Amino acid sequence: MSFQPVLPLSGYTGWGFLKRTMARQQAVQQAAPAQQRDEAYFRDRIGKADTAEKLVSDKRLLRIALTAFGLEGDVNSKAFVQKILEGSTLKEGSLANKLADKQYQKFAAAFGYGDFSVPRTKLSTFADEILTQYRARSFETAVGEQNNTYRLAMNAERELPLLAARTSSAEAKWYTILGSAPLREVMQTALGLPASFASIDIDQQVSVLKAKTEAAFGSADPAQFKDTKTMDALVRRYLLQSDIQAQASNSSPAARALALLQR
């Protein structure tokens, strides 16, 4: 039986419960036999995967590796994943660098198949490095199966401060946010923007996000999300706006008609 987190409440109140119990729940997941078997398998096999082809040929190994970067949806796209891994992240025009979702770049750089004559899988610390990320991501996945809003909030809490700390310009950070579907969803929802927002010109999207963010948080620079209080405020806005949108959807004429038919 797979691990199922305890999420007895929804909305912002439920988020508070999850945060308070997260360490204990993560410990329960990590002690689960299935999790233990996956970790033991990865430790035993990853050092032998000295080429990208060997990694993608072992579906279980690949699933664990991809999950560590939130890319588990690509587990059946072996040719695509192999191409990303074999392309250098040190060259500007490589596939991993060209893709809007920078998780692919992080994934390829972590394994180092296209960057070094000896991949990073040979490092003694490599298994621990990837498994630490795997534990965090697999917990988020389990949470997301019950409440995807919480999964997106957890992802934002991890990824936005890392992005905020980069030395790149504020403008470049906004384009990175727009290139990440999970971060885009959190920002767009927190700022009360409609789903149709994604269809306008991308430069205009950046302008709108900057203006809305400055109005909400006092600055248009994503660097502010290094601050824990500002990050907490963003997540709170996201969760509350998500609730508002869900209630509006449930109160629509179509939703009411469906509810009547289901009685």
Image (cartoon, helix red, strand yellow):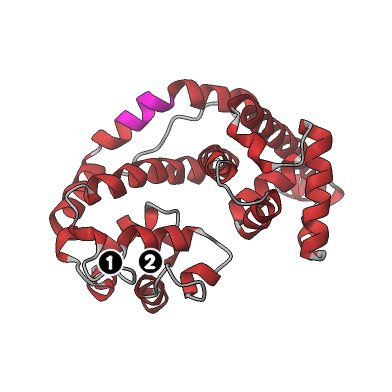
**How many numbered marks does the figure carry?**
2
Count residues near mark 1 (Cα–Cα under 10 Å), then give few for <14, some for 14-19, many for 20+.
some
Badge 1 is on which residue? 59
Chain part drawn in magenta: 22-27
Residue highlighted by disc 2: 75
- Whether residue 25 appears in magenta in the rendering, the answer is yes
Q: Is residue 137 above or below residue 13?
A: below
Q: Residue at x 80, y 33 (%)?
A: 216
Q: Residue at position x 42%, y 34% from top? A: 5
Front one among 85 and 199: 85
- Place of residue 123 in the rendered image (x, y in percent of width and height, measured from the top left): 19, 54
Contact, mark 1 vs mark 2 (Cβ under 8 Å): yes
Badge 1 marks a residue whose secondary structure is: helix
The amino acid type, in three-letter code, at marker 2 is Val
Q: Which mark is residue 16?
A: none
Q: Identify whether 209 is placed above or below 50.
A: above
In front of the other: 108 or 242: 108
Indicate the quadrant containing the N terminus: top left, top right, bottom left or bottom right: top left
* Residue at 35% over, 75% down: 86
Q: Amino acid at mark 1?
A: Lys
Q: CA distance from mark 1 to mark 2?
A: 7 Å
- Residue 176 in the image: x percent, y percent? 62, 56
